[in-house]
């Protein structure tokens, strides 16, 4: 009888322990994850900083993105490294949770399609200098900056439909910014020259498209409407859904007001 009673007590104790563990497991795992993320971010800050005597192997992201990650010039090329506190990055993470990790691993080509992007591929799996833990640390750091930037960003206001506002969109807005492919002066880098886009459509494209006649006809009918169609989704509207090399800029990246200002800026170039 005593053994039976003892068995019942033990079973009840085990059941109560199981319930207790189940109830408290999520907070415990959350706390563990928070601690791990904090450690990763701290390590990411070490890697991001300029190389030092103590840490000569640092990738030194700060050389281009600035010591605080808020952007800077890439050498003397005239190309600007993006602000890593930008709410735009947080927006990208909402649609692709691996966005930052992929850019660090495989380089700027992930963003712009430009294989000659100044942003190199850092992952050792493709010949870069960083192991998985280091990539994860930098990912955690940049994601934390982007989320902080999104949380502190003032409510966006629609830009005026002016050439000046459109120039700002062209050079600084979206990911990638138009200037990263088309150049600060619109002369073209990996993308085509747009210096005369206000007079004629660009038909000498890096990637030939199937609906070139439709492109020319749409431009003739309304240059602004054509540019809207091209910028929003060139593949869908002019190439049967096949990639053209021009990223699609949906309203999650460029608002309607930003797009109209951008078009006004582009059409000012005759």
Image: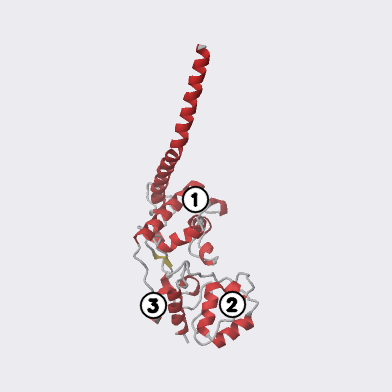
Residue 34 lies in quadrant: top left
- 191 relative position to 81: left or right: right
Disc on res. 205: 2
Instruction: Report, in whole angstroms, how far the alpha carbon at label 3 lies from the one at label 1.
Output: 39 Å
Q: Is residue 254 above or below residue 10?
A: below
Q: Is residue 71 above or below residue 122?
A: below
Instruction: Report, in whole angstroms, how far the alpha carbon at label 1 lies from the one at label 2.
Output: 35 Å
Disc 3 and disc 1 in contact, CB within 8 angstroms:
no
Disc on res. 179: none
Q: Nearer the viewer, mark 1 or mark 2?
A: 2
| In the foreground, 190 or 19 | 19
**Measured from the top left, where is residue 8 in percent x and y?**
51, 20
Q: Which residue appears at 57% of the width and 70% of the height?
A: 245
Tag 2: Cα neighbours inside 10 Å, few (<14), some, or many (≥20)?
few
Q: Which residue appears at 52% of the width and 11% of the height?
A: 1
Asked whether residue 69 appears in the rendered view, the answer is no
Q: Which residue is mark 3?
A: 165
Q: Which residue appears at 43% of the width and 74% of the height?
A: 258
């Amino acid at each position: 009888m005593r053994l039976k009673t003892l068995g019942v007590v033990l079973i009840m104790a085990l059941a109560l322990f199981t319930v207790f563990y189940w109830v408290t497991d999520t907070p415990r795992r959350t706390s563990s994850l928070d601690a791990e993320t904090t450690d990763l971010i701290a390590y990411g800050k070490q890697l991001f900083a300029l190389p030092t005597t103590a840490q000569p192997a640092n990738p030194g992201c700060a050389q281009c993105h600035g010591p605080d990650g808020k952007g800077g010039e890439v050498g003397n090329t005239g190309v600007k490294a993006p602000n890593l506190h930008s709410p735009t990055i947080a927006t990208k993470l909402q649609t692709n949770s691996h966005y930052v990790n992929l850019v660090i691993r495989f380089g700027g080509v992930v963003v712009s399609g430009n294989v000659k992007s100044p942003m190199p591929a850092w992952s050792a799996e493709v010949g870069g200098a960083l192991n998985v833990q280091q990539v994860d640390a930098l990912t955690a750091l940049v994601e934390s900056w982007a989320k902080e930037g999104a949380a502190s960003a003032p409510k966006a206001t629609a830009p005026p439909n002016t050439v000046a506002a459109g120039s700002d969109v062209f050079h600084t807005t979206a990911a990638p910014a138009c200037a990263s492919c088309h150049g600060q002066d619109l002369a073209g880098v990996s993308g085509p020259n747009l210096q005369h886009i206000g007079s004629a459509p660009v038909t000498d494209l890096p990637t030939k498209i199937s609906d070139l006649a439709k492109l020319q006809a749409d431009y003739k009918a309304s240059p602004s409407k054509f540019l809207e169609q091209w910028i929003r989704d060139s593949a869908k509207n002019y190439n049967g859904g096949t990639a053209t090399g021009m990223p699609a800029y949906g309203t999650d990246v460029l608002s309607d007001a930003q797009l109209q200002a951008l078009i006004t800026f582009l059409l000012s170039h005759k």
